[in-house]
Amino acid sequence: MVSIIPITKEQFTTISKSCVPLNIISLISSVISCLTFGFIQMYYPNLADRVSFRLTFAALFCDIGYSSHLLIVLSWNNTPGFLCGYTIWAIVFFGLSSLFFIVCIALNLHIIFINEYKSRYNFEKYYFIISFTLALILSILPVMGNMYGYDGPEASCWYRDSGQENNIIWQWITLFGWIDASILYCAIIVIMVIIKLRSVTKNVDDVFSSFPTSQLSGYPALINKNVISSVVRRVVWYPVVPLIAQFCNSFVETYAYVNRVVYYPLFLLCYVGMSLQGTKYFTYKTVHILLLLLFI
């Protein structure tokens, strides 16, 4: 086994002290979002009757599970054993579940808005089934390969043997590859939505330009440009959040494999990004809530 320069226990302790407050903020943000969505469900059921609303609600529960288990890793004195392996399985499972639910929101936008499929609810149950099942399978595979546990080079619980070939293969097959594919798909959807919105706006402008202004004064605009701007700001979060939250994670592991060192500054950024996932999703979901309350 080729040696790798690890981080020290003292360095991980510093990371923990820095990231625990961020993770607590992230957890509180997810809980607040969840309660707010519950409030809308109770008092504004018509606004809550949307596929994207229910998918976002599911992602919120996953964010709570993700932040809770990450908090255990950061605040607990990591030692080999069942709890070490379980917390990493939970982090991978809840992280992938949240990501896949967001991807399904983008997929639903692709089907309903871009492809103009008329039946809005036909695919909803499949979104939940596929997201949950795929996240469960991907998170269990490393359990079968005995990959979750105490990782010496990183002085914490993660995929074991960082810097080794089997470690990087397992991480890319069961985690990073799916994250990157999801980011790429969401980015493509953002571009397609922007193109579609511009096309629709142009068509409406062409129709209205063919009539005298006096004939249009009594009719509302079919497409409100402020609404379009709000929709674009909302969908652009789809790829941005997982990119910020998870990019450093994949980069630090790949860097360790290539350069034979767990680079401390990158490792710190990795945990900062992971700790802030719920906060960044809170920002996106707050935009979602505001759009709902504005009947957009």
Image (tube, rainbow, N blue to C red):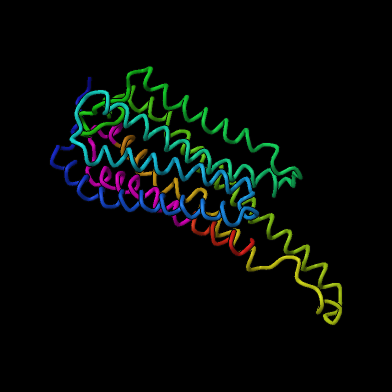
The percent coordinates of residue 99 (x first, y second) are 48, 40
Quarter occupied by residue 204: bottom right
Question: Does 270 appear in magenta?
Answer: yes
Horizontal relation, residue 132 to residue 146: left or right: right
Residue placed most toward the observer, 254 or 271: 271
**Drawn side of residue 195 relative to residue 157, left or right:** right
Residue 40 placed where, x, y %? 55, 55
Residue at 30% across / 33% down in the picture?
258
Q: Residue furthest front?
A: 42
User: Left or right: 223 with respect to 50?
Assistant: right
Main SS category, magenta section: helix
Q: Position of residue 143 (x, y in %)?
A: 36, 21
The residue located at (17%, 43%) in the rendering is 13
Q: Quadrant of the N terminus?
A: top left
Identify the residue at image location x=58%, y=41%. Answer: 104
Reply yes or no: does residue 191 show up in magenta: no
Magenta-colored span: 256-284
Image position of 169 with respect to 96: above or below:
above
Name the outermost residue toward the bottom. 214
On the rendered image, what quadrant is the C terminus found in? bottom right
